[in-house]
Amino acid sequence: QVQLVESGGGLVEAGGSLRLSCTPSGTIFSINAMGWYRQAPGNQRALVAIITSGGSTNYADSVKGRFTISRDNAKNTVYLQMNSLKPEDTAVYYCNAQKVRTRYFESDYWGQGTRVTVSS
């Protein structure tokens, strides 16, 4: 069973930075796209940024120019560098991995979520 292990959330003042990381457990043969989503109280989960295995990226308009998604394919790890954080970035951030191929099957996975709180 594959699990996505997230780290890097926490409390930061507005204007500060945080770096999230997400690594799958187990023996992974390949992963297609990896991304970060977030869910604030009362809101639905929404895409923050996504990166394909080839390195193509896409960002939510609200984070363009402030957040950078990157990926280490050798480690199957995805990162989200968040700069110039705003109180409205406060949310639980979830890692997502698409088409994760192991020896026996292929599936999509979600992390357990890491909380990011930005104080004003």
Image (tube, grey):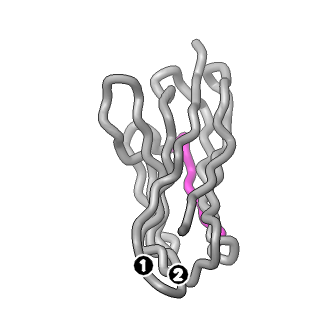
**Residue 54 locus on image (x, y percent):** 50, 77
Which residue: 61% across, 21% down? 14
Q: Position of residue 17 (x, y in %)?
A: 67, 34
Q: In this image, 19 relative to 32: left or right?
A: right
Residue 9 lies within the magenta run: no
Q: How many discs appear?
A: 2
81 up-or-down from 72: above or below: above
Residue 106 numbered tag: 1
Amino acid type shown at disc 2: Thr
User: What residue would you read off at disc 2?
Assistant: 102
Q: Position of residue 16 (x, y in %)?
A: 67, 28
Number of other residues with Cα within 10 Å of mark 1, as a class: few under 14, some 14 to 19, many 20 or more: some
User: Counting other residues with Cα less than 10 Å from the Cα at mark 2, is it few (<14), some (14-19), or many (20 or more)?
Assistant: some
* Element type at mark 1: strand
Region rendered in magenta: 65-72
Cβ atoms under marks 1 and 2 closer than 8 Å: yes
User: Measured along the vertical axis of the image, is residue 5 above or below residue 41?
Assistant: below
